[in-house]
Amino acid sequence: MPAFQLPPLSLYIHTPWCIQKCPYCDFNSRALKGGLNEEAYTNALLADLESELFQVYDRPLHSIFIGGGTPSLFSGGAIENLLQGVRQRITCPPDIEITLEANPGTLEAGRFEHYRAAGVNRLSIGVQSFDNGSLQRLGRIHGSDEAIAAFHSARAAGFERINLDLMFGLPSQSIAMAQFDLEQAIELKPEHISYYQLTLEPGTPFYHSPPNLPLEDNLWEIQQQGQALLSEQSYNQYEISAYAQPGEQCCHNLNYWRFGDYLGIGAGAHGKSSHPDGSITRRWKLTEPTPYLAAAGTNHALSGQKTLNRDEIPLEFMMNALRLHQGFTQALFEERTNLPFTTIAAPIEKAIQAGLLKNYDATFIPTPLGLRFLNNLLEQFLYEQPKGLL
């Protein structure tokens, strides 16, 4: 096996505030109460980044993703100061992909132009639906017209790479309603569409008081019809919920799914870092903004960290790589895990025999059955501690 080579390094920046919390959302976000102290949070983010620099190992950044929460609550000036601070601390190639998430209900006139001038070159707009009734049931603060206007404003500001987030399986949604949503998104001609099923996540209001969701058979038909329509319109499905025009895949997310590294800064942010000795560490930050702000830049901002043991790494790799429609190669597994392929040879063969995986010249690709029942496929790579051991 070749010597361990550090993978590409990305940066994830988390902003934990929204205008209001949606009833389906289990991300680290909370309703903004009072004013937003942009300067204090930006300074905390850069102090946090300083504390993570020991994991860079002279690598340039592969991509930057500003997520949330709602990053578009921040002004263009705050985003510019943040990105300038990042560039002062880590090498950023001139063509680096920089994505910012935006919600249509939080945008002021002209803000997109400021983001573009700050260096953001890819937007991800959280539309979720073009049906006003569905948006109300989801607790969204925008309407369909605002979503369409936000897209056109982004285009006018010079954004040539735009993703639209769209959900299906919404409360009281019919097959026809789901098809309408997708048709409206495609009509705008974004470069990328994230199309994913609403799920009831523990701890959310929807989980505790479930809304009236479509039946399983209808969900499967919605998904199949949606995939067919996207394919007809040249949106290639390259991941379970990601569809892109040729050459427009999200570089940042691809780095996640290929088991690359990423620094995580901001309240509740997670990071994953490989080290020259072949070890892999995960670190995550305090979720509450107030204690995070007080501790940013010190070890007290850490909520936890863990160095993965050898037996945990295969499942960690698979949880990412098996989301990809092109799968993964034997070489990528060895390169990103520092493990020999023999480590997973037995579960790979078992998954192939079960019809969940196919081997194309040492490239392992989930079958349609494997993608539909991904958890069953991942179970093949669970580490079971030998009996009799503590």
Image: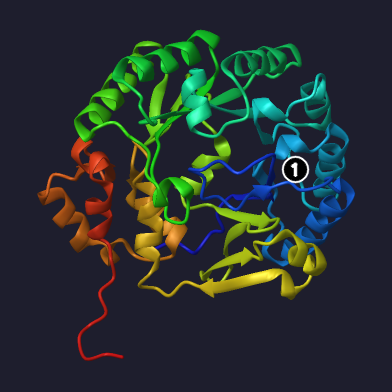
Seen from the viewer's position, the closer of residues 208 and 386 is: 208
The residue drawn where x is 81% and y is 19% is 109
309 or 57: nearer the viewer: 309
Question: Within the image, what quadrant is residue 382 found in?
Answer: bottom left
Q: 310 or 303: nearer the eye?
A: 303
Furthest residue toward top: 187
> Quick check: 221 left or right of 83?
left
Q: Is residue 366 visible?
A: no
Please state which amino acid type lies under the numbered disc 1.
Cys
Residue density around tag 1, few if under 14, some if 14–19, many if 20 or more, within 10 Å: some
Residue 186's place in the image compared with 169, above or below, is above
Q: How many marks?
A: 1
- The C terminus appears in which quarter of the rendering? bottom left
Q: Residue at x 35, y 72 (%)?
A: 311
Q: Residue at x 19, y 39 (%)?
A: 369
**Secondary structure type for disc 1:** loop
Q: Judge whether 126 appears above or below 50 on screen.
A: above
37 left or right of 148? right
On screen, residue 140 versus residue 385, left or right, reads right
User: Residue 187: x, y in percent?
Assistant: 50, 8
**Rendering coords of residue 148 (x, y %):** 61, 14
Q: Name the residue carrying label 1.
A: 92
Residue 175, given in percent of the width and then of the height, sits at: 30, 19
